[in-house]
Image (tube, grey):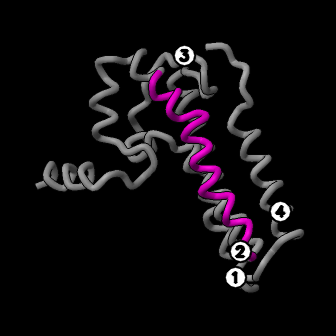
Amino acid sequence: MKNHKMLPPTYLFAAILLMAAMHFLLPLSRVILFPWRLLGIIPLSLGLALNLVANKAFKKHNTTVKPFEKSTTLIKDGLFRFTRNPMYLGFLCILTGLGVFLGSFTPFVIVPVFAVLMEFVFIRAEERSLAETFPEEWPDYKAKVNRWILGSPGNLSQRRNNRL
């Protein structure tokens, strides 16, 4: 595929700027007060860690991290055993942590909007590409590992049944 789109970190940076602007220009109300706002460091740090570990996995498996480039390996170990999209999940953790750190209501509006945007701009296309590139492995992997962390109840109950 032609790489003509902005990459996900650009969207993350834009979301961070938008959250800061909303906090300072239109905070509506403070929902988290100091010192509780410092707890935002936890999801922010988790998000950074998820991205670093996932990026290392891409390098270890010698495949691309860039959307719209053809993958050479379907990564199924490490973080990819728990989520098909650890980097996007990491971005959501970063945004959530920033929202907590800012402490006002309006920046939190960006988090679900960002998730939906990633879903439609990147994730669906990436998963179609993986299904085409790895027709034997993808269906099984997709059935076992959720897109984010929590998936449909069918997937969760299927996992419980497999453990019994």
Q: Looking at the image, tell me whether mark 2 or mark 1 is earlier in sequence order.
A: 1
Q: Going from the N terminus, do you reach mark 1 or mark 4 first? A: 4
Residue hosting label 3:
70
Q: Check disc 2 and report the residue beneath it.
A: 105
Q: Point out the frontmost of discs 2 and 3.
A: 2
Label 1 sits on residue: 31
Q: Is the residue marked by circle 1 packed among few (<14), some (14-19), or many (20+) residues within 10 Å?
A: few
- Marks 1/4: CA distance? 15 Å
Give the percent coordinates (x, y) of residue 5.
Answer: 72, 26
Secondary structure of residue under mark 2: loop
Amino acid on which disc 3 is placed: Lys
Q: What kind of residue is marked 2?
A: Phe
28 lies above or below 93: below
Asked if disc 2 and disc 1 are in contact, CB closer than 8 Å, the reply is yes
Q: CA distance from mark 2 to mark 1?
A: 6 Å
CA neighbours of label 3 inside 10 A, class few (<14), some (14 to 19), many (20+): some
Q: Residue at x 61, y 14 (%)?
A: 1
Instruction: Tell me the magenta residue range.
Output: 104-128
